[in-house]
Image: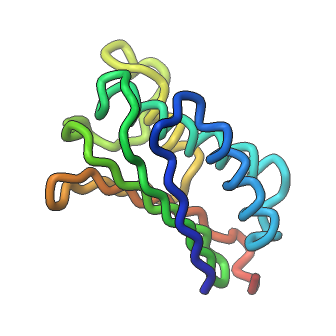
Amino acid sequence: MRLHHHIAHQSKDFQATDDRLTALVRSWAGWLDDDECRRLRLGLHELLVNIRDHAYHGSTGPIDLLFTASAGLFRIDVTDAGATFEGPIARALPEDLAEGGYGLPIVTAVFDEVVHVRLDGRNWWALEVHRKDGGAV
């Protein structure tokens, strides 16, 4: 199992985090092609923008990321100390988005599994993508 800790606080555009994700996917999860890597980058970026805009109300605050890779799994754990997330995490269709935006539906479309819990005053997100062919890394 491979682990990498990254802190994305005090960032408005998250470019360094996007670049770090791309490097780790290419290094650790060669079973993900370039298109899948771009999708993961988009999904993580959307979650980080949601955290900035909603949990931190448009300001910056600490966002901790832990990237993990093992045979057939790439996982990103994201935690923030912002406001509590109050919405459901369901795979939404475009016609279901009248009340909200496209951020979380993009996240749920990109990752195979998305989990959110509130623990000790922090939001914790687990984002996973699984190898489709079942082969080893």
28 relative to 46 in the view: left or right: right
Image coordinates of residue 70 in percent, x first then y, are 62, 82
Task: Give the vertical position of 119 relative to 84 (above or below).
Answer: below
Image coordinates of residue 29 in percent, x first then y, are 75, 70
| Placement of the N terminus among the 4 image quadrants | bottom right
Residue extending furthest left?
Answer: 120
Q: Which of 104 and 50 is in front in this view?
A: 50
Q: Nearer the viewer, residue 7 or 121?
A: 7
Q: Which of 44 and 120 is in front in this view?
A: 120
Image coordinates of residue 68 in percent, x first then y, are 57, 73
122 relative to 43 in the view: left or right: left
97 relative to 57 in the view: left or right: right
38 relative to 66 in the view: left or right: right
Please state the total of marks drawn on the protein image: 0
Residue extending furthest front?
Answer: 10
Task: Give the vertical position of 23 relative to 61 (above or below).
Answer: below
Q: Which residue is drawn at 42% across and 20% down?
A: 101
Tell me where residue 84 sits by quadrant.
top left
Q: Which residue is drawn at 47% across and 37% down?
A: 10
Tell me where residue 86 sits by quadrant.
top left
Q: Nearer the viewer, residue 47 or 91?
A: 47
Q: Residue at x 65, y 49 (%)?
A: 40
Q: Residue at x 33, y 48 (%)?
A: 80
Colour pattern of the rendering: rainbow
Task: Give the vertical position of 61 relative to 80 (above or below).
Answer: above
| Placement of the C terminus among the 4 image quadrants | bottom right
Residue extending furthest top?
Answer: 98
